[in-house]
Amino acid sequence: MRELFFKLFEMSHFDTGITITAFSIPHFVYLALIFGGIIGTWLAFRNRSAEAKEKVLRFLAYALVVSYLSDFFVHEFVYGGLNTDKLPFHICTVLCPLMAIAQFNRNGSKIKEPVAVLAALAPMMYLCYPASIGDGEPWCYQAVQTMFYHGVLMAWGILSIAFGAVTPDIKKVWKSAVLLVCITLWAKLGNILLEHNWFFLEEDAFYIGLVENGIIPKWVLMIANPTAFFLAVLAVYGICYAVRGKNKIRA
């Protein structure tokens, strides 16, 4: 049975030579499927009741939590042991429990706006450059689980805004700033205790050696990373306000 599971979760099943790497054809196919699925869901439910839209968001939330938790049970067969990179210290992984709180906890509305905005942004950045997806076949477990997780997280964030469950208010953008500071400090704690590179605070996200080669001091990443995300957050708010303005003109 153990050998069967190693076989099921291996990186290559058919020795096709086809691999999924950043900017490969399989990568672009995944992007088309994910963004197409989000757009299709929005088109299918945009005129439905608020209850129907809420069911979609709850379904996505359940799917994300199940995908994240169940993944740890098969790390032995995929990675040969615990993959510490998937512990909840990266922005995308920590957003899973935060999303669950925002979606299901009765007090979750207090953090739903910043969580939804970051859930739309962070996985989008990863999906555009999936550096840690490995080099397995596009249909291997690692590739499917990784793209599914980030795709569902992004779908929940985007559709929470598109369905009106969250209405970004620029007066509350400070909440995103506070959340980013908390995530940065949380990731730094994980890096210190477990000697990892969560939230890319030890080395740059592209691993081109900015810290290792002495181009920038490590502490710069503690400021640069959350600042870059906050600027992206401001861009999301700008897009939301622009869309609302167009809708008012049409009305």
Image (spheres, rainbow, N blue to C red):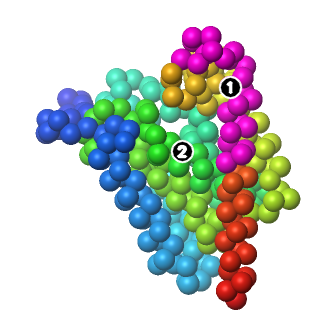
Viewport quadrant of the N terminus = top left
Q: Does the image show residue 183?
A: no
Q: Is residue 184 magenta?
A: no
Viewport quadrant of the C terminus = bottom right
Q: Amino acid at mark 2?
A: Met
In the displayed structure, does residue 142 sit left or right of residue 153? left
The percent coordinates of residue 3 (x first, y second) are 20, 29
Near mark 1 (Cα within 10 A), the count class, few <14, some 14-19 or many ≥20, is many
Q: Does the image show residue 40?
A: yes
In the displayed structure, does residue 141 sit left or right of residue 101? left
The percent coordinates of residue 235 (x first, y second) are 69, 54
In the displayed structure, does residue 76 sit left or right of residue 191? left
Q: Looking at the rendered structure, which numbered label has been put on residue 221?
A: 1
Can you tell which quarter of the image residue 89 is in? top right
Labels in figure, total: 2
Spatial CA distance of label 1 from label 2 is: 17 Å
Q: Which residue is mark 2?
A: 125
Comparing 231 with 9, the one in front is: 231
- Point out the stretch of residues depicted in magenta: 209-232
Comparing 106 with 124, the one in front is: 124
For image coordinates 55% across by 29% down, the residue present is 205
Q: Secondary structure at mark 1?
A: helix
Near mark 2 (Cα within 10 A), the count class, few <14, some 14-19 or many ≥20, is some
Comparing 41 with 17, the one in front is: 17
For image coordinates 31% across by 42% down, the residue present is 24
Judge whether 224 appears above or below 197 on screen: below
